[in-house]
Image (cartoon, rainbow, N blue to C red):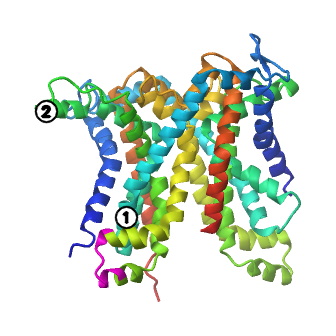
Amino acid sequence: MLAPVWAWLLVLVAAPAAALVVIALAEADSGIPPFRLALSPTGFATLVEDAYYLDAVLTALRVAVTTSACCLLVAYPMAIGIARAAPRRRVLLLVLLMLPFWTGFLLRVGAWIGLLRDEGWINRLLMAAGITDAPLPLLYSEGAMLVGMVHAYLPFAVLPLFAALLRLDPALGEAAADLGARPATIFFTVTLPVTAPDAAAGFLLVFIPAAGEFVIPELMGPPEAQLVGRVLWQEFFQNRDWPVAAALAVALLALLLVPIRLFQRLGARA
Amino acid sequence: MRRGRFTGAAMAAGFVFLWLPILLLVGYAFSADRIPFQWGGFSLRWFAALAGNERIVEAAGLSLRIAAGAATLAVLLGGAAGWALARFGRFRGRALFGMLIGAPLVLPEVVTGLSLLLVFVALEGATGWPQGRGALTVLLAHATLGAAFVAVVVQARLAETDRSLEEAAMDLGATPFTAFRTITLPLIAPALGAGWLLAFTLSLDDVVIASFVSGPAGTTLPMALFAMLRRGLTPEVNALGAVVVLGVGAMLALATLLLRPRPRGE
């Protein structure tokens, strides 16, 4: 009964994982496909010896952590506001939160390019207002890349927080307010500690895809922002070095193993 | 009352951040100007240009067919997998099964894309199938990704429904198949529908996995759009954005109308 599903999973999930390791150990070759099966450490050795690859991993981790932190910062007040809204309004706000997700990731990136480029909407606005004479180099910067990534992943951070806040007993906050606590005090002493595991889940839900992100750094980031996803892409498509690309994929997976396990633990708890 | 004013303002700012680029993208689709995001009077010329852009129109048709096929396959596979995980108890290999079905949820796209491509290449080398890469390999990859999401949705739905309903049907003499068809299937139908839509959207939105596993004859809409964005923005991107956003909005409005609970008569 489950045999077709098993067959599917073995061929299209288990075998690909195994293939990554096999090709990572192969030797690059000029044939088609461009490798020769072997048990060669060359692919992994290249990653260790050339600082370029370590840099790519570290840059990706730094960008992913920054993205996740920014997402949480924006997500908290949104989740609190949505959870507090009256039920009918809450549905509307949730639709407004999720609808951008259904409108196409690349189109949203395109919209940001239109706003941020030299002759873009924001620069024309700034120049018309006399704030600047020459267009500011907004696009192809680390800031533009972060804006794009936070925009893409924000709903992933809001949803777990929103679910946690719905479960949170409003009496807790009201009791604190009755005892004279100010809103900020309530947030830091009641809301934040109670929702911390869900904030961690939201953080990881953004962090895991962001760590391997390719499209936004490529279209909005500066050329020197060589994140691991981008480097893997170049090794594969431009350099046609399949063993190094596969070795990078294995390394990225190994790095994400701990965050993924942590996320699954947090998910099982909720 | 001070409480909530800061939260309200910060929430509003969050929604403006989320929606301003999308609204401007759609609004400027109706501008005549050659420069994107610059107002040059009302015009539909960029919609006409988009409709005349053969590469985009062809890619859109291919993407819709791939998405529909992948979503349907994903519902069959993911539905069976979610059902097994929720109802089959501790069957042999359950832990491995759960790990494999869920893996595409947490793998970075570049890893999924590269690893699937390697398997397609190896399969072709060993068996001659799939011959080359294109729409079929993209469909298989997207079905694998979609099945993971469908399995989660279906498993969650079954976990909150009472299995004694199915047991009662079988006690009354229904075969397992009849019990499944008359009890389980109607219970999980909304989850299957939601899963289908999710898998469909994921397929329509994916550029990374498709770029790895596709071939020269299989340019999907996101791949064509990615190439357009790389070359430089044109107002045709605005027009495409308007078509998608207004289309999704219209479908949402239709679904709300159809699914609105009717006032019960006598």
Between A183 and B95, the residue placed more toward the observer is A183
Q: Which residue sits at x=61%, y=53%?
A: B196
Observer-nearest of B139 and A53: A53
In 3D space, how far apart are the residues under numbered discs 1 and 2 (Cα atoms)?
Answer: 37 Å
Residue drawn at point x = 18 percent, y = 23 percent: A134
Q: Residue A249: name its quadrant.
A: top right
Residue A80 in the image, given as x and y percentages of width and height? 38, 67
- Tell me the crowding category of disc 2: few under 14, some 14 to 19, or many 20 or more residues within 10 angstroms, Cα based: few
> In the rendered structure, does residue A183 fall within the stretch colored magenta?
yes
Q: Is residue B250 visible?
A: no
Give residue B218's quadrant in the image: top right
Dot 1 amino acid type? Leu
Q: Secondary structure at mark 2?
A: loop
> Which x, y percent locates residue B38?
22, 30
Nearest to N terminus: mark 1 or mark 2: 1
Q: How many marks?
A: 2
Does residue B141 show up?
yes
Residue corresponding to mark 1: A92
Is B117 part of what is drawn in magenta?
Answer: no
Q: Is residue B92 left or right of residue B57?
A: right
Q: What element does badge 1 sit on?
A: helix
Q: What's the mark number on residue A131?
A: 2
Per the rendered image, the range of residues in magenta is: A176-184
Query: Residue A243 appears at what percent x and percent y?
Result: 73, 23
Do marks 1 and 2 share a subunit? yes
Q: Amino acid at mark 2?
A: Ile
Residue extending farthest top = A30
